[in-house]
């Protein structure tokens, strides 16, 4: 079998980022308090104890998926940094249920009307 040929260069396409290209796109950032990140660290530790695997992570995808549905757009959540990025501003009331649900579920309480 012949050896694969390699290329000595990399082709890259670049676009100049202009306001017209972004067309008014915005990102809203929310920095949570240290008490929130401490709570999430505790949640993560409880989840690892339940599944009995140190490499497991608390299911923060529940939070991001719920917020994507509620906001109708992009959501990024970094629980360790306590950072939430969304395309649309989110009120505290909108955040309350998606943040509370993983905490309830990990503790065996009914998060979605059904105990896990």
Image (cartoon, grey):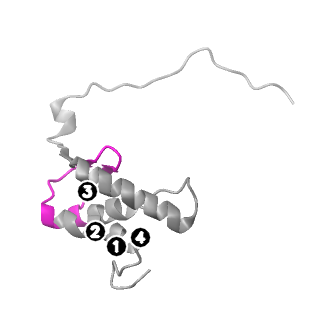
Where is mark 2, residue-wise?
A: 100
Q: Earlier in the sequence, mark 3 or mark 2?
A: 3
Where is mark 3, residue-wise?
A: 73
Q: Quadrant of residue 94?
A: bottom left
Task: Identify the residue at horizontal 32%, vertical 71% (top origin).
Answer: 101
| Separation (CA) of disc 3 from disc 2 | 21 Å
Task: Please identify the quadrant where the N terminus is shown.
Answer: top right
Asked if one can make out residue 20 in the rendered structure from this viewpoint, the answer is yes
Range drawn in magenta = 69-93
- Dot 3: what SS? loop
Q: Quadrant of residue 71?
A: bottom left
Q: Earlier in the sequence, mark 4 or mark 2?
A: 2
Q: Earlier in the sequence, mark 3 or mark 1?
A: 3
Tell me the crowding category of disc 1: few under 14, some 14 to 19, or many 20 or more residues within 10 angstroms, Cα based.
Answer: some
Furthest toward the bottom, the residue is 114
Q: Tags 4 and 1 in contact by the CB under 8 Å rule?
A: yes
| Separation (CA) of disc 3 from disc 4 | 26 Å
Where is mark 1, residue-wise?
A: 104
Q: Is residue 91 left or right of residue 6?
A: left
Q: Which mark is residue 106?
A: 4
Q: Is residue 2 left or right of residue 87?
A: right
Compared to residue 31, the image places residue 22 above or below, namely above
Residue 39 horizontal/vertical position (percent): 31, 57
> Between tags 3 and 2, which lies in front?
2
Asked if one can make out residue 75 in the rendered structure from this viewpoint, the answer is no
């Amino acid at each position: 079998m012949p050896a694969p040929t390699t290329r000595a260069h990399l082709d890259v396409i670049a676009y100049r980022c202009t306001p017209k290209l972004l067309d008014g796109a915005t990102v809203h950032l929310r920095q949570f308090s240290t008490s929130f990140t401490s709570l999430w660290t505790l949640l993560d530790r409880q989840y690892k104890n339940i599944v009995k695997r140190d490499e497991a992570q608390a299911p923060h995808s529940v939070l991001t998926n719920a917020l994507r549905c509620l906001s109708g757009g992009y959501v990024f959540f970094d629980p360790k940094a306590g950072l939430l990025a969304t395309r649309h501003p989110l009120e505290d009331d909108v955040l309350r249920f998606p943040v509370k649900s993983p905490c309830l579920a990990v503790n065996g309480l009914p998060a979605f009307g059904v105990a896990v």
